[in-house]
Image: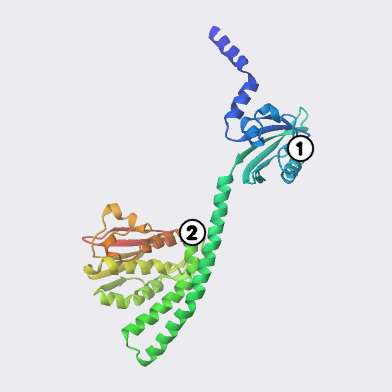
Amino acid sequence: MGRCKSQNAHTNVIGDATLLDILMNNLPDTIYFKDKEGRFIKVNSHQAEMLGVPNTKDAIGRTDFDFFPESFSRVARNDELTIMSSGEAIRSKLERLVDKEGKVKWFSATKAPIPDENGKSIGIVGLSRDVTERQEMETSMEELNSLRELLLDIITHDLKNPVGVIQNVSEMALEEDPENDFLQLIHSTSQSLIQVLQNTTLLSQAAMGETIPMEKLDLVKIIDESVDEFSLSLKQANLDIELDLPESFPVEANILITEIFKNFLSNAIKYARDGKLIRITLENDSQSVMVKVLDQGTTIPKADREKVFQRHHQLDAESKRGRGLGLAIVKRIAIAHNGESWVEPNIPQGNVFCLRLPL
């Protein structure tokens, strides 16, 4: 009994007001209470610091107009009047404040009415958190995205004309010498580059994790066209290619999916030419379709199988055969299709680059 009495006495000594002060002054947010006239009746230490007063008691009886610019204070007062008349809180409102030094600060503010015993609003309680750093970061990201779009527009505009000239000249040359492999390569490459320029914005959206539009495409046709584009490169690398594909396979996808197969093939030509054979297979079940590109080159070590899909990572950095971006692009495009890409070992030697897409 004595022990219980001691605990009750201890609680009474602390008191509700002291507990509230402990809570208010140890939270990272500014907290304040106001009467119906907008005068401060209680503030925590963070609110006092924001108001620029040395002590919390120095804020009592004063209003926002005593501390902040007229424009900010008027908006805040209108919010208070709306809250008290409606009896409803305002939550997570983004507020912009220019301090005395001219610095812009942003706050996420929540304000609620204080009711009397009859439910009538007699003031408000407010809480705000400084979100300046977050807001500046979001603004910077928006500016970077705008700059990115501008640069893409400039690049695509300035490249379209010379690429178009290359395509037209190669077409005229092919009319004179239709069996010339080098002219065919120039022509097909120029066509591919035009397609890349047309898809630059989509590729940028996929790289940034944004949504890209989908349409019905034939996955087998896309793979066949990618193989045709690399036919001369495969021949020069002395690589045979074997396709184990159905006649067609319709999927909901974006034409960017082509870049995945081009990168898989380009990667095999660069790093697996000693294997002499590349196989492409397609498997599906009721939920997904999986395309595999199998080579017989040097097997990628287990520790590097995830790293090869990271930007600028190269297994053979000394050879400088690329910038280590291709497979990173593959991963982004796969994610944009709600799919996944990875590499696993081929048996007995080589690698299997995989793409799985949901159906």
Question: Residue sitting at 33 percent across and 55 percent down?
Answer: 307
Give the vertical position of 22 relative to 265 (above or below).
above
Quarter of the picture containing the N terminus is top right
The amino acid type found where label 2 is placed reads Met
Question: Which residue is tagged 2?
Answer: 208
Q: Quadrant of the C terminus?
A: bottom left
Instruction: Please tell me which of labels 2 and 1 falls first in the chain.
Output: 1
| Rendered image coloring scheme | rainbow
Percent position (x, y) of residue 255?
46, 70
Q: Is residue 147 above or below residue 115?
A: below
Which sits in the foreground, 216 or 7? 7
Residue 358 appears in the rendering: no
Q: What kind of residue is marked 1?
A: Met
Residue receiving disc 1: 84
Is residue 276 visible from the viewing direction of this image?
yes
Q: Where does residue 158 sit, x and y in percent of width and height?
A: 50, 75
Q: Which residue reaches farthest bottom? A: 176
Q: Which mark is residue 323?
A: none
Q: Residue furthest front?
A: 101
In terms of image quadrants, where is residue 115?
top right
Label 2 sits on a secondary structure element that is: loop
Q: Callout 1: helix, strand or loop?
A: helix
Give the vertical position of 216 relative to 115 (above or below): below
Q: Is residue 32 left or right of residue 303?
A: right
Q: Which residue: 57% across, 29% down?
A: 26
Report the label total.
2
- Closer to us: 288 or 111: 111
Where residue 321 sits in the image (x, y, percent)? Answer: 30, 66
